[in-house]
Amino acid sequence: MFCRLLFLLSIISPFILSAQIATEIKLEPAMVTVKYERKVEMDTLDRGNKARTTILTLKAGKNHSAFYDAKRKWIDSIEYRYDDFFRAQYNGKEYYDFVGKTSSIKLFKNYPEGKIRVHDFFDICRWNIDEDMEKPEWNVTDSTANILGYECIMATTKFRGRVWNVWFTPEIPVSDGPWKLWGLPGLILHASDSNNDYTFSALEVSDRNPGYVEYFDYRPQPIFESTKRIKSLQRKWKSSQENIAYRIATSGMLGDKTPDVSKMKKTFILKYDFEETDYPHE
């Protein structure tokens, strides 16, 4: 599938004049690049059988970091430049099976300004969520372990509704980690909440030619702005209980590729919660 798409794009790209200009800003040289496996229990009543995994990348520099799905970045960079062509290669189900296996969430930390910008997609809308960086209150323990050849120390924290256990290595003096976990005297290589609903496990660490920390955005307008983290979580919680496939199918977005909706459920019960649970579940 990827080969077919790349081959076709190599042929037509010189003739496409209306490609969207993407936002790509090199913020600073990265000090380290880490690939993590993110594992999410999608059904907390049937643990282990419905877990979803994605590979996420952290590029961390002195003042900034970016945490994202590199495969989704690649897809977005193509789709939003050559949208009509990209979608024409797949029917509705193929397209959403293709994209749905990636993560749309991106986090950009700005340490000098004490801000995090989150890109997210929910309620069939694109969102920028700006929030203050909240440093977890860590309890560093005496427990040690070796991860990927690095000596690591265990630390714990209660952060935004969950208890997190992490392993960080002082051998890599980068005070960052997956998701919104940071603030330790070393890079976090493993993190999991106390229920193991969310797990981040480093698969690969590299400080050789790690490239740049970039701020990027390939999403078309409109993009909705929100500075209210709690309200964003509430809206996401509500929309996550709606059948997104049904909403997309009935919205007309798929045109003549719209599937039969007569047997689709409009709503369902969400059987898991987000990384952050400190919001009213209404």
Image (cartoon, grey):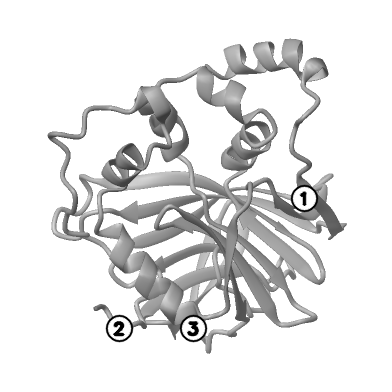
Residue 23 marker? 1
Q: Could you tell me which residue is drawn at 83 percent across and 54 percent down?
A: 25
Marks 2 and 3, how far apart in space? 32 Å
Query: Where the C terminus falls, by quadrant?
Result: bottom left
Tags 3 and 1 touching, CB below 8 Å: no
| Mark closest to the chain's N terminus, 2 or 3 | 3
243 relative to 169 in the view: left or right = left
Q: Position of residue 278 (x, y in %)?
A: 36, 83
Marks 2 and 1, how far apart in space? 34 Å
Amino acid at circle 3? Thr
According to the picture, the residue beneath numbered tag 3 turns out to be: 141
Marks 3 and 1, how far apart in space? 42 Å
Q: Please tell me which residue lies in front, 264 or 217.
A: 264
According to the picture, the residue beneath numbered tag 2 turns out to be: 280
Quadrant of the rendered image containing residue 73: top right
Quadrant of the rendered image containing residue 183: bottom right
Within 10 angstroms of label 1, few (less than 14), some, or many (20 or more) residues?
few
Q: Please tell me which residue lies in front, 252 or 246.
A: 252
Q: Could you tell me which residue is drawn at 43 percent across and 81 percent down?
A: 230
